[in-house]
Image: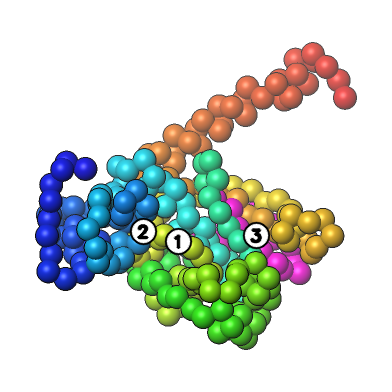
Amino acid sequence: PDGNVRRFEQPVSGKELAASIGAGLAKAALAIRINGEMKDLATRIDKDANVSIVTAKDPDALELLRHDAAHVMAQAVQEVFPGTQVTFGPTTEDGFYYDFARETPFSTDDFEKIEKRMREIVDADLPIIRKVWEKQAAIEHFKSIGEIYKAETIDEVIKPGDPITVYSHGDKWGDLCRGPHLPSTGRLGKAFKLMKLAGAYWRGDQNNQQLQRIYGTAWSDEKQLAEYLHRLEEAEKRDHRKLGRQLELFHM
């Protein structure tokens, strides 16, 4: 972005590029933007490109963190509640969610156990590894581990020849995902909180199986998380539906 030009005799990863600029930048780097597109820090640059290093100060860094928070939550849920299937979990305006298939309903009492395991996964600082799979091999893999929703998606939605990428947390857990992701689970930090439960249908079709959705929020640091929770608390105090009953402005 500052117009600086660096030349290399061979392909260089985003991590190596950041290190060539400075140790501080290498430590702060979360991802890399190549010709305007965000990529994993491990992505190798093999041709001339406009490049910027993404740090926590980048406007898009928060979405990256929340994407990883969703994956860490999904791993935690499957480890705390074996047999649970994961479907999909995108980011939202102020957080993330993941839809799960499980016969036994979750309750908000489960949040403490899930968050505890999430913090342990962050402490483990597992490397986040991107792998490209062949379509049939990916279908067979997810079927073999009981992930029928993932296998169905790959089989019916992903076109032949399209890249199939799986992101794993070390050798502990992995999921179908386009990415990008942080270099490791430790970079997520612990400024996250699970917020609420909701129902959802597979692929948004009420004729399909009902899933359980867990919502969470994630921020760059504990201060931002605390400020967000305070805003929610203040908004609840001013909820017209609640105040209307308290002030006897209306009755139901």
Q: Decide if residue 83 is in sight here.
A: no
Residue, disc 1: 179
Residue nearer the viewer, 127 or 224: 127
Judged from the image, the secondary structure of the residue bearing numbered disc 1 is loop
Instruction: Give how far apart the Cα atoms at labels 1 and 3 are.
Output: 18 Å
Q: Residue at position x 88%, y 24% from top?
A: 252
Q: Check disc 2 and give the amino acid type.
A: Lys
Within 10 Å of the Cα at label 1, are there few (<14), some (14-19), or many (20+) other Cα atoms? some
Is 82 left, or right, of 37 in this rendering? right
* Mark whose residue sits in front, 1 or 3: 1
Q: Are marks 2 and 1 in contact (CB under 8 Å)?
A: yes
Is 63 left, or right, of 211 in this rendering? left
Q: Is residue 240 above or below residue 201?
A: above
Is 121 left, or right, of 244 in this rendering? left
Residue, disc 2: 39
Residue, disc 3: 99
Precedes in sequence: disc 2 or disc 1: 2
Q: Residue at position x 60%, y 70% from top?
A: 159
Q: Position of residue 157 (x, y in %)?
A: 65, 67
Judged from the image, the secondary structure of the residue bearing numbered disc 2 is strand
For the record, the magenta segment spans 96-115
Q: Is residue 99 magenta?
A: yes
Instruction: Give how far apart the Cα atoms at labels 2 and 1 are.
Output: 8 Å
Q: Check disc 1 and give the amino acid type.
A: Gly
Residue nearer the viewer, 145 or 54: 54
Q: Position of residue 160 (x, y in %)?
A: 58, 74
Precedes in sequence: disc 1 or disc 3: 3
Q: Check disc 3 and give the amino acid type.
A: Asp
Within 10 Å of the Cα at label 3, are there few (<14), some (14-19), or many (20+) other Cα atoms? many
